[in-house]
Amino acid sequence: MIRQVFAWFLKRPDIKVKSGVEIYRMPRTALIWILASLTSVIIPHMLRMPVWLTLLCGCCIGTSVLIFQGRISHPGSKIKTSIVFVVLFAIVTQYGRDIFSTDAIVGVLVVGIALKLLEMKKKQDVLMVIYLCYFTVLAEFIYSQSIPVAIYMALTVLVITSALMSITQTEEFQRPMRTLKLSGIVLLQSIPLMAILFLIFPRIAPLWSVPMQNSNGITGLSDEMSPGDIGDLTRSGDLAFRVEFSSEIPPYSQLYWRGITLEQFDGREWSRRRFRNAQYLGVDKQELYPWFREIRTLGEPVRYNVIMEPTQQSWVFTLMVPQLTNERLFMRREFQVGTQRPINQRMSYDATSYLDHIVDLEMSRGMTNNNLSIPESGNEQSRAFAEQMYAEAESDEDFINTILQYIRNNEFFYTLSPSLLGENAIDDFLFNTREGFCEHYASTFTYLMRAAGIPARVVTGYQGGEFNKYNDTLIVRQYDAHAWSEVWLEGRGWVRVDPTAAVAPGRIEFGSQFTFQEDEGFLDDEVFSLLQFRSSSLLINDLILRMEMIDYAWNRFVLNYDQGMQFALFSRLFENVNQRKVLLSLLVFMFLFTGLTAFMVLRKPIKKAQTPVNALYLKFCRFLGDNGINRHSGEAPMIYSERVAAVQPQWATDVAAITRLYMELAFNKISPEERLGKTHQLKLAIRKFQVIN
Amino acid sequence: MSKEESLPVSDIAPRKIRDKIEEAVSEISNVILGKEKQIRLSLCCLFAGGHLLMEDKPGMGKTTLSQALANAFGLNYSRIQFTSDLLPADILGVTIYDQSNGEFSFHQGPIFSNLVLADEINRTTPKTQSALLEAMEEGQVSIDNKTMVLPRPFFVIATQNPVSFAGTYPLPESQLDRFLMRLQIGYPDPAAERELLNNRDQREKIAGMKQSLNAEDVIQISNQIPEVHTTDTLLDYVQRIVAYTRQDNLFSFGLSPRGAMALTRSARTWALMHDRMHVIPEDVQMVLPAVVDHRLRAISDASGRSSESYYQRLLNEVDIFSE
């Protein structure tokens, strides 16, 4: 079946070349490989491309086959020009203002290759198509860098390399699979070089950044929170970050990954305070600030490395209370750790946290006020409730416990699809709907604290995560997102209080995946995800964790391999390294390497390579030579064969047969098909002879 | 010759011709005993349309061989004994006034034959030598502004005594080059010599020879030569041989392009004679000594004669395959 399809493709009349017009005649298998590479380059982009672009590519592929078969001729320049204009116009219309987006640029690239198919008149044109394929295949990396994509791209590169090889092959090569095998061998051979270059090639910061539209909304936390307005929270299983602990792993209920603190409340929405005089604290300056100096730490620190998915935001997640160890990170007054720029690519950072700590024993008046402010009006009921309870409580701690007790004892529900809240959101939740998720509880609790005169704030981040026993990492997914409160107590500083624990203790103890499994909305977006089925089978759960492990290694050691890691590698190998030295020695090394190679190549006299048939025969002669019968210089094959037969009579028939086959191939007039078959026959005969003897 | 028989045989050359050649070889072998290789090479030279130079001491059978060749082919044969007073006209012919019809008429010289034996060519003056060589080269002669075509096939066997013998005008290199091959017959081996001594008169034997081939056959074979296939691998080999002779530290001059062409053409003919439509390295090696022998002069040897060891070096040191 495949043979027949190939045969149809390869059908080509022997066109008489018009006088004066040199038309490049592509080898037959080349067309198959070029079309295959174009198709495999386009497939991953197809989902993002408009349908008409895909159809256009299909048409171009079809037309190029017809041109190759000589059924139609190459389109003239007028037709070509008009096609180009029409397509360009269509693309501009299609993408409009997004014309400089990655999607549009990839679209132009793809359509460019497809149209180039129509004018493959010269070898350069064909090469152009192939090189563009190599280029476009890389564009896929802008969208995804996962292992499956990398594997797919490697396969595509294999196909494109086959195309590149096939255009240099003669008409004799009529079996495309042989080309594939050959290019596979070549690519395998190039792997060591690739690995070395991967490790030592200088990592230079990109000169420009690629415009991305990654802020699709569902990923990551936003810097405001208004629980009353969300009726149906979709929680995705997307990866948020991974953590690898280098010290002892803290208990699960302590894993509060602190993201941002929300201190401003307008009665409905919590938001981040926009600092006018924010105190940013770099790693080099941390001793300068009293509030930092006054952090009292107890016990052993927790050390960990986090690899974070891009969020387009500029904060990272740490356990309370973090110590800065990384010069790219800085800390703000409320112990929130961030970066200078939005995180638009996967980022890795090391952090150290002291889980036992006392912070901000003394707090400034301004900061106290910030954490007490509530709108003058609204939520009257709640405010009265707080004031009343506070009056009844013996201490601040007692008051907190009373509130938590209240939530626990009354019929509060934890759900991802709560009713919407009315104008006085806090009142409505506390006395009316009584159903919600962490944000509702954190928001209400913090409000009550502030109403009672205890400084409090909302913190959002992630809680818990999933522990992967295969590589000792903690996987934190988007559905682990959480919100909790921090209250300031006299003599104790800031203390974390999680009101959600009062209503859904399992959420904190075991993680959200066990709490929400039955809940609607949980993983609604992940229809095809294995995560959907993880509860049904231990095996699948195991599989997920193993895949996670591989993916982690891929991220940690391949995608994350940057200047820093390269530098670390060099420091491990050599003493006394610095960036400049590394770069300089690499340059010198490369210069010397290329120089030496060039020298060696240029010094050697130009040598004609043996034809494949002669090479085979010489290999055979060497084998005989290793067995004691050297072919003399100038000894012709037939004479040699007779000499071998005289010395080793048991070989006579085989050697004579091989020699006859070789003579036929090397010196007789022979058709290309026959040559290919007989070369193979010769190869087999020699191999067989070597195996037997 | 079992070697050639095991080679792949192509059917393009008619088997009839091959049988005729074999017959001719055995017929001639009856006359010249124990010299089969030389006989085959001289046949090859004849088919290739070249001319043959036989160099040996007197009495080695040069004349016998050429007579036998002429008889085996049924070619008309003339023999010119070269002497120091021989003039070009003695070879080419003369124009004589015919009184009976009052016109000048041309009387053809001995060169107007299919096979010319030029005996002891180095005994005559360079002027006469070059008249013969010109005719050999052109296949025609010009006398009194008239051009006359020589019969086809036209084959010259020139014999010469070794240069060291007294009273000779040795042929210059440029003229040696005109001969396709140079052969030495050499002393017969004892068995052949015994048979020779036992036998009847040689002349009777030559007269009683059976004609195996005719002029038509020779032309037919000649016409097939260009169709014999040579592959790149083979031509690479030939070119490497040629390049080897041109190295300036071995020979005072290397093979000329004409020499290279002679080598290929002889190899083609040799292949054809063995029923093959393609040349193999063995063919080249078989004809090589005869073709290059008179075209090379080693630096160490000023006499113009390259001894056997020189072409043996070519055979041994130039490999069939490039390094």
Image (cartoon, grey):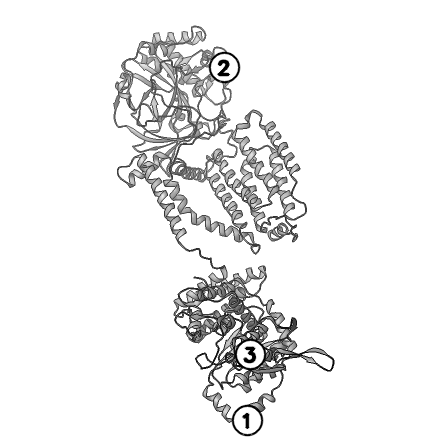
SS category of the residue bearing label 3 = strand
The reply to the same-chain question for discs 3 and 2 is: no
Residue beneath the point at 62% across and 77% down: B17
Which chain does the numbered disc 2 sit on? A
Residue beneath the point at 54% across and 84% down: B63
Residue type pointed to by label 1: Arg
Q: CA distance from mark 3 to mark 1?
A: 26 Å
Which residue is nearer to you in this view: A346 or B240? B240
User: Badge 3, how many Cα within 10 Å: few under 14, some, many 20+?
Assistant: many
Above or below: residue A83 compared with residue A7: above
Residue A328, image x, y percentages: 35, 26
The picture quadrant where one finds residue B39 is: bottom right
Q: Which residue is mark 3?
A: B157
User: Badge 1, how many Cα within 10 Å: few under 14, some, many 20+?
Assistant: few
- Residue B12 in sight from this viewpoint: no
Q: CA distance from mark 1 to mark 2?
A: 139 Å
- Tag of residue B200: 1
- Tag of residue A567: none
SS category of the residue bearing label 2 = loop
The reply to the same-chain question for discs 3 and 1 is: yes
SS category of the residue bearing label 1 = loop
- Tag of residue A421: 2
Residue beneath the point at 66% across and 37% down: A79
Which residue is nearer to you in this view: A20 or A139? A20
Residue B239, image x, y percentages: 49, 64
Q: CA distance from mark 3 to mark 2?
A: 124 Å
Residue type pointed to by label 2: Leu
Residue A98, image x, y percentages: 55, 26
Q: In front: mark 3 or mark 2?
A: 3
